[in-house]
Image: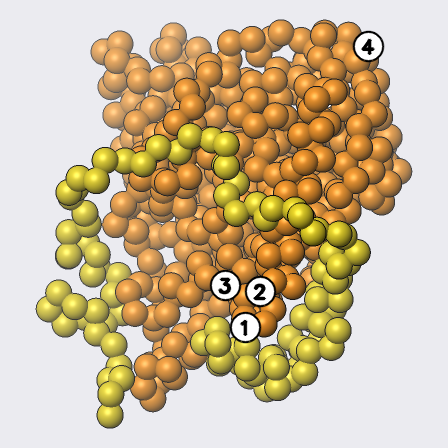
Chain colours: A orange, B yellow
Amino acid sequence: MSVPPLLSLSIAELGRKLEAREVSSEEVTRASLARVEATDGRLGAFLQVTPERALADARASDARRASGEARSPLDGVPLALKDILLTEGVETTAASLILGGFVPPYDAAVVERLRGAGAVLVGKLNMDEFAMGSSNENSAYRPCRNPYDLSRTPGGSSGGSAAAVASRQVFGALGTDTGGSIRQPAGFCGVVGVKPTYGRVSRYGVIAFASSLDQVGPLARTVPDAALLLRAIAGHDPRDMTSSARPVPDYLQGLEGGARGLTIGVPREWLALGADAGVLASVREALATYERLGARLVDVDLPHAKYGIAAYYLVAPAEASSNLARYDGVRFGLRVEGKGLRDMYGGTRDRGFGPEPKRRIMLGTYALSAGYYDAYYLRAQKVRTLVRGDFDRAFERCDLVAGPVSPTVAFALGEKVADPLQMYLADVYTIGVNLAALPGLSVPAGLDRASRLPVGLQLVGRPFDEATLLRAARALEREIGPLPPPEALA
Amino acid sequence: MALSVEEVRRIAALARLQLEPGEEARLAGELSAILDYVRQLEELDVSGVEPMTHALAAESTPLRPDEVQASLPPEKALANAPSREGTCFKVPRIIE
């Protein structure tokens, strides 16, 4: 099935056609559902598709457009959600067996906001179980594949989100990012992904993994589309105690401001962290493009960057072991009956959790257990302060930091599953940004010369300065043009 | 550092995970490798460094007013219960 041209439009272009009544939301929603139907058996981006709801929402959107009451540029646009975001009345599993059959009693704040903006939600997207993974292979339900090469992973943990957007099943998606889970799959699938500043987007109704690191953010095919989605979901929410009250700027204003006058910091240490030659070549080309566009490149130092993964694999599992204690067979999800309460807990959690959540629960429980807290968790939290300090000093000399998203292009399914530590190292460039609570963005930097697979450029900004990241990403996007669409599902 | 199967059993009990015997041995190996890796943090001198206990230390995250608000109605809260009785979640007997 070739991709209908309608589905290759950007959200901005589709919005104009919807506004001009050249196309209806029902028409584009049907096209989106048909594309999912035709391709998802091979791709595996969705865990659940909700066609009846989507079509009802599309017809309601068309009625609003007809009476001139469109709620936003997203009104009538088909989008989809990572299955870690609660959706009232629609099963939400975080790709775990322990939440099989769980039907949330309320919507996540970001889902409320998208619905409020009139968006049409097509279904729930595949992911690594509880967002723990970098390849989507930890999904308890089905693998997801990379639309540029079906033998490779889409990245993770928001692999379904990136694959669905890249393959033109939907126009945009939401994911979550705890150590790179939006930026890395966006890079692997050639789309734009934004990890906002910690506190920028409400986590109310987001299934918790590591609470001091988790953020929700958009994935889209263009930078203006990502800006539109971020504008729709950002802002204060009194139901999330870590939600910032800072006003949200209009990310579309100034988006076309170009790269002239920007100072871009290039961390010396990042180049030494073992990225493939092809990835480094694409990153260097992108940096040269910025220089040509009038940006200034400066060397910066992030001396603690190499300790990021070690600190993360203490902090995140410790918090996960605490957050995942709630899955105990009592209030929701799976219950495996046993002899008494203790047996019921143990059996439920053994059967319900897959290998990666178990590994992290064990690691986190160990790191927090009596006698080890100071040596592990507390030390890791001090290293976080050092990682943040590196960035603070860098931002005294530059407006943003640029480098690779991942050390490699998309790797093959099965390549790293046998060695958890190798999988963890795939996040070496993204993890520090979560530890430091900063905004980060992945934008396509072109195709790798040898493999013809997408390479992502990562941009990191000052706290709450998503606007500068988006403006810089847009400048590159305008220069290099859109990536060739993936052909594996054409 | 090598984590023994006995230690894995002790941690699994704390985490309320009932592991199979094969899983225990595999986890002992995997967790040992990860703990060896994180050991590199010991190279760093962190004396005098404050831990990052709040990711938004300098940021305003206002408290909401302490007012009574509507919460989830019992029927909705109980809708996903694996076992219930009346308006309660039902659990196995804990006192013999």
Residue bearing the label numbered 2: A373
Distance of label 4 from label 2 (alpha carbons): 50 Å
- Residue A318's spot in the image, x, y percent? 54, 60
In the displayed structure image, the side of residue A106 where residue A361 appears, left or right: right
Location of residue A15 (image quadrant)? top left
Distance of label 3 from label 4 (alpha carbons): 48 Å
Q: Nearer the viewer, residue B90 or B36?
A: B36
Q: Are marks 2 and 3 on the same chain?
A: yes
In this view of the protein, can residue A224 be seen by the observer?
A: yes
Disc marking residue A292? 4
Q: Are marks 1 and 2 in contact (CB under 8 Å)?
A: yes
The type of residue carrying mark 1 is: Ala
Give SS at disc 3: helix
Q: Earlier in the sequence, mark 3 or mark 4?
A: 4
Q: Are marks 1 and 2 on the same chain?
A: yes
- Residue A54's spot in the image, x, y percent? 34, 35
Residue bearing the label numbered 3: A321
Q: Residue at x 48, y 76 (%)?
A: B14
Q: Earlier in the sequence, mark 2 or mark 3?
A: 3
Q: Are marks 1 and 3 in contact (CB under 8 Å)?
A: no
Residue bearing the label numbered 1: A370
Give the chain letter at badge 1.
A
Give the chain letter at badge 3.
A
- Residue A67's spot in the image, x, y percent? 23, 11
In this view of the protein, can residue A359 be seen by the observer?
A: no
Q: Earlier in the sequence, mark 1 or mark 4?
A: 4
Q: Nearer the viewer, residue B62 or A6?
A: B62
The C terminus of chain A: image quadrant: top right
Is A191 above or below relative to A480? Answer: below
Of labels 1 and 4, the one closer to you? 1
